[in-house]
Image (cartoon, rainbow, N blue to C red):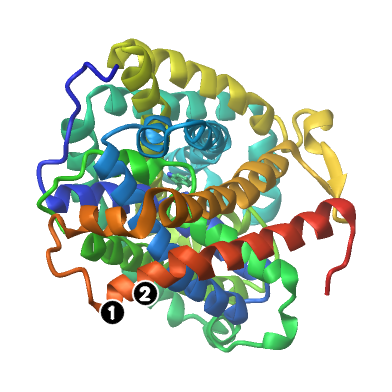
Amino acid sequence: MAQQQRGSFSSRLGFIAAAAGSAVGLGNIWKFPYETGLNGGAAFLVIYLFCVFIICMPILVAEITVGRHARQNPHGSYKKIGGGNWGVIGTIGIIVGIMILSFYNVVAGWAFGYFLQTSFGDLLSKGDFASYFGKYTANVTDNLIFSLAFMVATGLIVAGGVQKGIERWTKILMPVLLVIVLGLIVYGLTLPNAREGVSFYLVPDFSEVEAGTFFSALSQAFFSLSLGMGAIITYGSYFNKEDNIVSSAALVTTTDSLIAFLSGLLVFPLVFFQAQEPTEGPGLVFVALPGIFEQMGPMIGPLIGGTFFLLLCFAALTSTISLLEVPVAYVTDEFNVKRKPAVIGIASLIFLLGLPSMLAHGAVDWFTNFATYGGETHNFMTVLITIFSDIGLPFGGFMISIFVAYKWGMKRFADEIEHGHPHFRGRIEEKFVTVMLSFISPLVVGTILIITVLQSFFGIQVF
Ligand code: TRP
């Protein structure tokens, strides 16, 4: 097995660009603001940052290290290091990733449609952007075409292989996205009522916090950092021995949370300026942003708005690449299939799995009102998000902590990190990572998962 030559990143910057590209995506610009809005604003932000830096960053180090040591896809990595049935944990992660990509690709299709409609269509003259979003997402033809286009683009890049495809694009497009977001923030902050938005986002009110807030913040942290299903194990398997895992992980974490933070700073002033509801849910970005593009007038609006949505598409693309790369690496590693046929087969499968999510926004009633739990009716896409992202990813994070601390062992783990970081042992970061992976992360993640499952699915109120 694994007879084919494996790719690797050309430099440490290449890995950081690819991992940050994987991390920064719809999770930062679409999901983070609406989760923050639904969960009360600033208090959520504080808990989120705690989850990112304290709970998740050590898990990020763990995933990179496992991947670099084993030089395998997630299934192969768990199996090679852990033996026995450990490979199953990697396989579960691969399935989780496939399901996440199935709905992620649909949302990416919306972003692509919004790019076209903003630049070349009449979106900005619609006025009522909330009802436009409702109509847009219920429209089957556009969704079908644009998410297909998105999957094809993802597939073409993944077929190109690790270096040529993944590294190059990310390095160019991420800085441009940062610049446009910064520009829009400055513009938004000058608008009337921006201040209310800023205080909703930055002045915490902890009386709003409930058990569910911790769960949402934790799952969002996993989703945003691309953790818990093996994407980072896979990218770690292309990571060079001479490079420093710990500092790379810190840089990726900082970049990702910075972009998420800025995206909130962009969205909430606009929401309050337009007297919209921060609790809008998954439509938030698609409803809040067109309004200010419209304000910018018929020349500048489509230009700036179109550029924004186009860059959002690119951010999403570097994330879909990392999601597709995982099952492709699995199939090429384990079954000695060539990259191209693997990409074609798997991308087609995932596109088909995405169809119910596409039809869950008004097109087909059965998928739109799919299941009732926690006192609410959820559409098919939300159900996928709950099971695979909200629960699946923290579960994967829990498993890798246990795996590294108690199966592989912190000694061998530290040996691997010492390549590229010779003074790791004895430093504060070694102690931090050790304590977190052995005790705190599994304990916190495990507790939150158990409480949530009891509460939302069995209606048992724990506190
Ligand atoms: N992190 C990406 C985002 O924020 C999404 C993503 C890419 C992802 N790869 C992943 C999420 C792997 C979970 C697991 O948009």
> Is 361 in front, or is 115?
361
Q: Amino acid at mark 1?
A: Ile
**Label 1 CB-ligand 1 distance < 8 A:** no
In percent of width and height, residue 184 lies at 38, 68
* Above-or-below relation of 328 to 248: above
> As drawn, is 435 to the left or to the right of 51?
left
Numbered circle sitting on residue 428: 1
In percent of width and height, residue 247 lies at 22, 65
Numbered circle sitting on residue 302: none
**Label 2 CB-ligand 1 distance < 8 A:** no
Q: Amino acid at mark 2?
A: Phe
Q: Quadrant of residue 262?
A: bottom left
Q: Residue at (54%, 46%) from the top-left corner? A: 123
Residue 462 visible? The answer is yes
In percent of width and height, residue 306 lies at 39, 49
In percent of width and height, residue 437 lies at 45, 63
- Crowd class of label 1 (few under 14; some 14 to 19; many from 20; radius 10 Å): few
What is the quadrant of the N terminus in the image? Answer: top left
List the residue tagged with mark 2: 432
Q: Quadrant of residue 426?
A: bottom left
Q: Residue at (43%, 82%) from the top-left corner? A: 190
Disc 2, SS: helix
> As drawn, is 380 to the left or to the right of 87?
right
Disc 1, SS: helix
Q: Quadrant of residue 41?
A: bottom right
> Do the residues bearing badges 2 and 1 touch, measured as CB atoms within 8 Å?
yes
Residue 278 visible? The answer is no
Q: Residue at (42%, 49%) from the top-left corner? A: 309
* Above-or-below relation of 373 to 112: below
* Above-or-below relation of 170 to 48: above
Q: Residue at (37%, 74%) from the top-left corner? A: 432
* Above-or-below relation of 144 to 374: above
